Amino acid sequence: RTHISQLFADADQLGGTTVTVAGWVRSVRDMKNFGFVMLNDGSCFKDLQVVMKRDELANYDEIAATGVGSALSVTGTLMLTPERPQPFELQASSICVEGASAPDYPMQKKRQTREFLRTQQHLRSRTNLFRAVFRVRSVAAYAIHSFFQERGFVYVNTPIITTSDAEGAGEMFRVTTLDMENPPRTEDGHVDWSQDFFGRPANLTVSGQLQAENFALSFGDVYTFGPTFRAENSNTRRHAAEFWMVEPEMAFCDLEGDMDCAEAMLKYVINYVMERCPDEMEFFNKFVDKGLVERLTHVATSDFARVSYTDAIKILQEAQEGGHVFEYPVDWGCDLQTEHERFLTEEHFRRPTFVTDYPAAIKAFYMRMNDDGKTVAAADCLVPGIGEIVGGSQREERLDVLERRIAELGMEADQYKYYLDLRRYGGCKHAGFGLGFERLVMYLTGVDNIRDVIPHPRTVGNADF
Ligand code: 4AD
Ligand code: MG
């Protein structure tokens, strides 16, 4: 079997030869004595046009009546057609129905809403939009590995099941081995969750950062790339309960180095995807987000903005004085809401923007305290259309400061025993960040809902299939 992608790549050499392809029917047109089948095998974005002739095909009527979505294999001669819009077509000598598609196949040729397509998780990957999105997702994942591997980073797999809350935000899903029909109880009659995981409490990880820090202090530069889970009840277009995160961690690196790495990584992935997915990018640019390619090209070739949280608040307040209305109040100390992030990156800086040095009170316990005693060495990267795409920081490497912070926040120091130990045995300045992989795919494709960039989304109320 030849992949259709190979036909497009090597049409000149393959013209006139006999090839066999197999794929799914996109459309059938029966002109009585001849007909056309558009076939896609997933190997590339483009469809192959198959031409069949009644005289030459014993089962012509069967094929002319096959439904959209059917799986076919086709053997025929590749005919070059340089005078027509498609550079070649396959003149079928035999066509075999590998698997017919029932007449109620829900994928119609006309454009269907993304809401409807979300109810068709198992079939939507056969549409142009999702074929394009999920190939870009695959290529972007490869680009991430390529970026870090080229720079000598070690890929570390961090655990999914863990007792520690890496973000200290209590947004964890419990993992349980308890018999829920008959759970162990505490003296006062409540379920004894401390028995959860073979006798210990356990959760799904919210981030691999703490374990990545572990490996950074032996390998220097490392990264994770894996699924993470958040039990936050946020029903928005950019939050999922299960999402993939890329988390590099670098020893002997400060916040500046951290931002440089994030910026270089984003530019690298943009270039990589634009180079390797031209058909998909052209499709997005035409049908999803006009101006996408121009915008990404600009992003890949110009500097990101960098502004402190304190200055960002001033910018937002000035905008407010100038008449801009925000739903949420803007005061020093407030967490930046999506509307604030979008104003900064879309209206003010008009490009990706790092906001640095946030108030300690709204950031995680592990971020390094600045000399002012109020802010931490954090940097979030905000991008137009999405808001926060990367969240990172320099880490608190000073044992006493970290212990104090953990106590202040009322966290259980026990849970962080290993983490604290790393500050005892050769701890050093280090920094890292987390890139939300789905948010990156949204950014690369212009698709504006996280449910449409992950194959089987797990969002509030949705975990089927
Ligand atoms: O800002 P967050 O929570 O940072 C961390 O988890 C750190 N441990 C990262 C690190 O420094 N190693 O998450 C990082 C990124 C966010 O910027 C966002 O892009 C994405 O992960 N993210 C989500 N994506 C989809 N759905 C959610 N519920 C997300 N929560 C965070
Ligand atoms: Mg964050």
Image (cartoon, grey):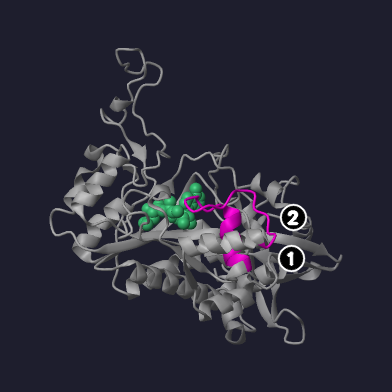
Q: Is residue 270 left or right of residue 84?
A: left
Q: Position of residue 162 (x, y in %)?
A: 31, 41
Q: Please determine whether, in this image, residue 311 is positioned above or below residue 115.
A: below
Residue 66's disc number: 2
Residue 191 in sight here:
yes
Q: Residues within 10 Å of mark 2 (few under 14, many from 20)?
A: many
Q: Amino acid at mark 2?
A: Thr
Quarter in which the N terminus is drawn: bottom right
Classified by dominant secondary structure, the portion drawn in magenta counts as loop
Q: Position of residue 255 (x, y in %)?
A: 34, 66
Q: Please determine whether, in this image, residue 350 is positioned above or below residue 224.
A: below
From which residue to which does the magenta span run? 322-347
Q: Nearer the viewer, residue 396 or 426?
A: 396
Residue 182's disc number: none
Q: Secondary structure at mark 2?
A: loop
Decide whether residue 189 is among the magenta residues.
Answer: no
Residue 37's disc number: 1
Q: Position of residue 61 (x, y in %)?
A: 79, 58
- x 27%, y 29%: residue: 198
The answer for how far apart the CA atoms under marks 1 and 2 are is 10 Å
Callout count: 2
Q: Amino acid at mark 1?
A: Val
Q: Is residue 444 left or right of residue 247?
A: right
- x 64%, y 53%: residue: 326
Q: Secondary structure at mark 1?
A: strand
Q: Is residue 152 left or right of residue 339?
A: left
Q: Residue furthest right?
A: 32
Sequence-wise first label, 1 or 2: 1
